[in-house]
Every structure is written in structure tokens, then in C-alpha cells.
Image (cartoon, rainbow, N blue to C red):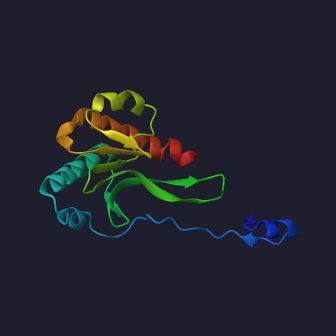
Amino acid sequence: MERCRDPADKRSGVCQTAVMVENKTQATDASVEDFLDGVENPARQRDGLRLLALMKEHTGETPVMWGPGIVGFGSYHYRYESGREGDTVAVGFSPRKGSLSLYGLTYAPEAAELLPRLGKHKVGAGCLYINKLEDVDEAVLAELIRAGHRHSTTVMHQE
């Protein structure tokens, strides 16, 4: 695939071959347990350990570190019309300082019906943000995890 970045190149017909850009966040061999043990805030660490158990239970997947700070469960391959493609986490979380960031839980069609029942949360850029797990209904969160994982590993995998 060729892409002309400079209009002058485009007019002359001399273009650079597009270079495959590697996804910044990739699966690693790092220890999930070591990562969660290193979370400084005790409440955030406790919530991270609970999310680990919930996501293991409701995805049936073994947790894997994605980059230095995301615990992921399953993956899917994506390919954009631009030609960019790669693998990314199906569902996952990161116990960040400001909030718990949950990935892959907002894309399933069921999410539109489940999110209003979840409890205190924010949604943005494909992420679900929760301040603390006690703010949400864990049964609804479990449904979101199952729906998000199923959607990511079946529907999104085929797109």
C-alpha cells in the first residue's frame, strides 16, 4: 500500500510505501500479580484484585498484562480501512490513580441498557471509569464484562 504524504510527491507520482505502525499497547510477559501488588493506594489495589477475580470468572480467560498498566482478558484482531491493523485487549482494566479504567465494556449492544443500571460511573473514549467498586452494582458489572468479552471476541473480531 502506498501513501503520499507530501502533495508535491502526489502530483509527481512518487510516494513512500506505508510503514506498518506497531501498536503501542501489546501483550507482555509481565506478572499481573506483581503489577497489582505494586498499586500504592490500598483501596485501588483491593478493587484491582476484585476486578481480577470478576473478569477471570466472567470471561474464562487467563489475565495478561498489556503494556505496563492494563490487565487484559482475551484479545481480538482489528483492521481499519486505512490498512492499520493489530491486536488489542478484549476486556480489561487498569487501577489508575484517578479512577478504575475498564476497557471493552461499552461496545456491546447490551451496554446501552446496562450502563444506566450500573451505578456511579463515567464513559469516555471507549472506556468506563469507576471511582470505586462499591459505587456500582457488581451484578450489572458482571453482565457488562460478559457482554463486552463476547462482543469483542466474536463481533469485533470479524469486523
Seen in the picture, residue 113 relative to 64 is either above or below; the reply is: above
Seen in the picture, residue 151 relative to 76 is either above or below; the reply is: above
Q: Is residue 113 left or right of residue 51?
A: right
Task: Tell which residue pokes out farthest to the right in this image.
Answer: 12
Q: 83 or 62: which is nearer to us?
A: 83
Report x, y in % for residue 29: 34, 70
Report x, y in % for residue 118: 28, 32
Identify the residue shown where x is 52% and y is 41%: 155
Seen in the picture, residue 134 relative to 71 is either above or below; the reply is: above
Q: Kindly indicate the quadrant of the structure image that contains residue 83.
A: bottom right
Identify the residue shown where x is 38% and y is 27%: 113
Report x, y in % for residue 156: 52, 45
Q: Where the N terminus falls, by quadrant?
A: bottom right
Q: How many labels does the image show?
A: 0
Identify the residue shown where x is 30% and y is 43%: 58
Q: Kindly indicate the quadrant of the structure image that contains residue 110.
A: top left
Report x, y in % for residue 125: 44, 46
Q: Where the C terminus falls, by quadrant?
A: top right
Identify the residue shown where x is 72% and y is 71%: 17
Q: In this view, does 95 lie to the left or right of 23?
A: left
